[in-house]
């Protein structure tokens, strides 16, 4: 389906702006009135990233604050968790399939078994889920993010003299090379187009600047991928990805920006933290 009016009316996004044309939540509401049922299903899968955060927050604290951009309410998340824990094969079709795996692992404490932080474990399951999308752009986006994260982890482990195998997730060619190759580039120069860019980004000592460069890489990839998709759902999806990035960074310039800045730095440090006791 072609979305001529929607795409023609989308405001340009400048990452130097201090104000967004509208929020991600407003964009979601707008799309719900326009998209076909099939494309709405694709878009809903992309908003599951907020439900992931809500799910993990709920599992840790039933009274945790929920992100309104998620598709499921606190009550729905609670019902899903209860059903997954009580029924071997839940019948609720709203439950994303990877929720079942994650809630079961969280309940039984399998974090040490998978040798990943809970956030990384959930993200890995989500990337696998998106990797099976019917839409090639979404599949490729999931692979890009999976590859970026895996390469950064492998480079961090190598720099710290720590074995990286337990932290590599997924089963694509990049992941397999990272697990098996001893080459300086893990044999990825000809396999992962963005490998050299990611390696240069990894050398950036400032964590916030590193994250800015990663997002710039992602935005460039989006522009290249949708260059010939003028009025398709892929261009709408690409706009959503950029809007999500922009919303994240604009938040740092607001009154609560200092605390958000510190929170993101803490999260980044955690994401690159390697536990040498898990090998």
Image (spheres, grey):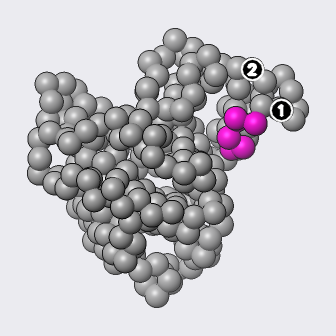
| Span of residues in magenta | 93-98
Q: Which residue is mark 1?
A: 91
> Horizontal and vertical percent for residue 258?
17, 29
Labels 1 and 2 touching (C-beta < 8 A): no
Q: Which residue is mark 2?
A: 82
Prevailing SS of the magenta stretch: loop
* Residue 102 horizontal side relative to residue 194, left or right: right
* Residue 90 horizontal side relative to residue 204, left or right: right
**Residue 94 within the segment the image draws in magenta:** yes
Q: Is residue 218 above or below residue 275?
A: below
Q: Residue at x 52, y 11 (%)?
A: 63
Nearest the eye: 130 or 232: 232
Q: Is residue 252 above or below residue 235?
A: above
Mark in front: 1 vs 2: 1
* Residue 154 horizontal side relative to residue 131, left or right: left
C-alpha separation, residue under disc 1 versus residue under disc 2:
12 Å
């Amino acid at each position: 389906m072609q979305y001529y009016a929607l795409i023609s009316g989308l405001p340009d996004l400048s990452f130097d702006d201090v104000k967004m044309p509208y929020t991600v939540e407003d964009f979601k509401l707008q799309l719900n009135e326009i998209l076909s049922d099939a494309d709405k299903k694709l878009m809903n899968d992309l908003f599951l990233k907020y439900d992931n955060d809500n799910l993990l927050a709920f599992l840790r604290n039933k009274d945790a604050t929920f992100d309104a951009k998620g598709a499921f309410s606190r009550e729905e998340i609670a019902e899903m968790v209860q059903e997954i824990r009580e029924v071997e094969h839940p019948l609720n079709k709203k439950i994303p399939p990877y929720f079942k795996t994650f809630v079961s692992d969280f309940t039984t404490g399998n974090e040490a078994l998978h040798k990943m932080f809970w956030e990384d474990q959930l993200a890995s399951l989500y990337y696998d889920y998106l990797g099976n999308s019917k839409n090639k752009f979404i599949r490729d986006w999931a692979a890009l993010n999976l590859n970026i994260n895996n390469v950064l982890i492998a480079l961090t482990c190598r720099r710290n003299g720590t074995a990286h195998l337990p932290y590599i997730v997924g089963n694509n060619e990049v992941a397999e090379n990272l697990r098996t190759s001893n080459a300086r580039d893990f044999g990825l120069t000809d396999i992962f187009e963005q490998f050299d860019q990611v390696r240069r980004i990894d050398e950036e000592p400032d964590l916030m600047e590193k994250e800015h460069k990663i997002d710039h890489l992602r935005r460039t990839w989006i522009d290249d991928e949708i260059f010939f998709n003028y009025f398709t759902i892929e261009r709408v999806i690409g706009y959503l990805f950029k809007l999500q990035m922009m919303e994240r960074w604009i938040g740092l310039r607001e009154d609560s920006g200092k605390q958000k800045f510190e929170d993101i730095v803490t999260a980044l440090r955690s994401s690159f933290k390697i536990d040498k006791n898990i090998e």
